Amino acid sequence: MSPKSPTETKRFPARPARPTFGQRCGQYGGECAGSRPLRCEQNRFEFGCPAPTVNKHKGGAILLKEPELIFHIVKTLRGRLPAHIPLTAKMRLGYEDKSRALECACAIAEGGACGLTVHARTKAEGYEPPAHWEWIRKIRDSVNIPVTANGDVFSLQDYIGIKTISGCNSVMLGRGAVIRPDLARQIKQYENGGPVKDTDFAEVSKWIRQFFELCLTKEANNKYPLARLKQWLGMMKKEFAAAQNLFDRVRTVKDADEVRNILAEFEREMNT
């Protein structure tokens, strides 16, 4: 990686070092631990990925058909990682149905994982509502490790609901944090017992511009920055009318500099 220019350093100042988390998937994840160690403070094994390419190669959610293999993977990986490195896992409720959900969760716990995140759908259910929060409670009651609830948390009310129904103390955000960028802050305000304040789109417009600049820093010579910007706006427009406005302005634009000008103009409008 090339050093940052003075301009980039000013625009994106250095941040404090943060813990790094490595993620693994695949039927050979355990065996790979010794030969290709991840220099991370924590490792997580992914038994929930619904992506067809991953499942085609026997990784992700398809492993939920075989609790015995899950146990072997977790046990092998736990045995090959340094003792001080935590190993956690994430799973869905099953591949085609939920019939082996509890078996899979117990296999993960008995294999040596110290934490489990549960997305409350099967692979076949994809991301279609509803998420079955009540099944997370069943899993939580069946294992002796902490369980984190995940699935369809798009608002503070959803956060309160999933905690109540699942009985979990921790919640993982997914698409909700993208659609509603201030959701984590609202949750923190709620948990701290203070007033919960919605953001306005003037603040979000600053994040959008910063995000686009970061995308350009990563890959300026292809379609990546424009595609990611439009994807994000496409998700946020369900929550913010102003996101629809901005999406319409950039939808057909293909030049990065033109998009920069549109974003700057839009931010000025939002702050006047």
Image (cartoon, helix red, strand yellow):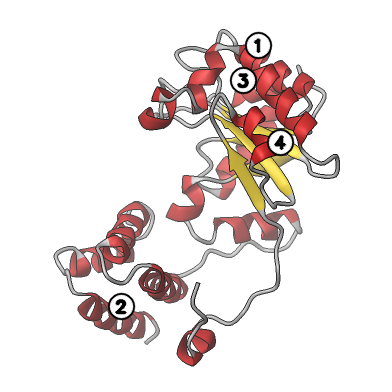
Mark in front: 2 vs 4: 4
Looking at the rendered structure, the secondary structure element under dot 2 is helix
Residue drawn at (58%, 49%) of the image: 156
Which circle marks residue 88 in the picture? 4
Mark in front: 1 vs 3: 1
Which circle marks residue 263 in the picture? 2
Which of the two discs, 1 and 3, labels the residue nearer the N terminus?
A: 1
Q: Tell me, yes or no, if residue 132 can be seen here.
A: yes
Which of the two discs, 1 and 2, labels the residue nearer the N terminus?
A: 1
Q: Mark 4 and mark 3: span between their CA atoms?
A: 19 Å
Which circle marks residue 135 in the picture? 3
Which of the two discs, 2 and 4, labels the residue nearer the N terminus?
A: 4
> Is 128 on the left-hand or right-hand side of 159?
left
Q: Mark 2 and mark 3: span between their CA atoms?
A: 43 Å
Q: Amino acid at mark 4?
A: Thr
Q: Mark 2 and mark 4: span between their CA atoms?
A: 40 Å
Q: Residues within 10 Å of mark 3 (few under 14, many from 20)?
A: many
Q: Which residue is mark 1?
A: 68
Residue 27, x across and y down, in percent: 56, 24
Q: Mark 4 and mark 1: span between their CA atoms?
A: 17 Å
Residue drawn at (42%, 69%) of the image: 211
Residue 122, x across and y down, in percent: 48, 21
Which residue, as the protein is rendered here, is positioned at the far top?
Answer: 99
Q: Amino acid at mark 2?
A: Leu
